[in-house]
Amino acid sequence: MVASRSARERKARAEAGPLASVKIDVDGSQQFIYKIGCTECVAKAPAKWSAYRAGEDNGYMAAMDRWTFHLTQKHPGAEAPCLAYLDAAQQRLHERREGSLDS
């Protein structure tokens, strides 16, 4: 069974924790775009900080990794289930950086 957009949004919201606002959009090719925002931080007035990035790297793992890094850097005492995957997120970041150096 494929999870609905609202079910995926609920799961992402639960994983991201209480400081997150989560929204899932669908792009032109019917792919899910995850937008995770911080309820406390402002990036550029009046916009709130968000893990959403223009381009194709807005899937669940990429957005949740960026959110996890934001939590650890800007809200070190925050609690969220996604923080359990910090080591894996750091490993993925390291691999992406190594891959971009090889190109």
Image: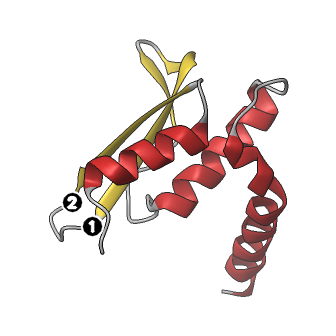
Image: 46 above or below 77: above
Q: In percent of the image, x 56 and y 60: which residue is there?
A: 62
The quarter of the image holding the N terminus is: bottom left
The quarter of the image holding the C terminus is: bottom right
**Which mark identifies residue 31?**
1
Q: Can residue 76 be seen in this view?
A: yes
Where does residue 60 sit, x and y in percent of width and height? 49, 59
Label 2 sits on what residue type? Asp
> Which residue lies most toward the left here?
28
Q: In this view, does 5 lie to the left or right of 89?
A: left
> Which residue lies most toward the front here?
1
Q: Disc 2 marks which residue?
A: 27
Q: In this view, does 20 lie to the left or right of 28?
A: right
- Do callouts 1 and 2 mark residues in contact (Cβ within 8 Å)? yes
Image: 101 above or below 15: below
Q: In percent of the image, x 71 and y 82: which residue is there?
A: 99
Label 1 sits on what residue type? Gln
Quick one: 60 or 6, which is closer to the camera? 6
**Which mark identifies residue 98?**
none
Where does residue 85 sit, x and y in percent of width and height? 76, 57
Q: In which quarter of the image is residue 17?
A: top right
Quick one: 77 or 27, which is closer to the camera? 77
Q: In percent of the image, x 84 and y 60: which residue is there?
A: 87
Q: Can residue 52 be seen in this view?
A: no
Q: At numbered mark 2, what does the secondary structure look like: helix, strand or loop?
A: loop
Disc 2: CA contacts within 10 A as few (<14), some (14-19) or many (>=20): few
Q: In percent of the image, x 38 and y 46: which residue is there?
A: 9
Colouring style:
secondary structure
Where does residue 37 sit, x and y in percent of width and height? 49, 31
Where does residue 42 sit, x and y in percent of width and height? 54, 17
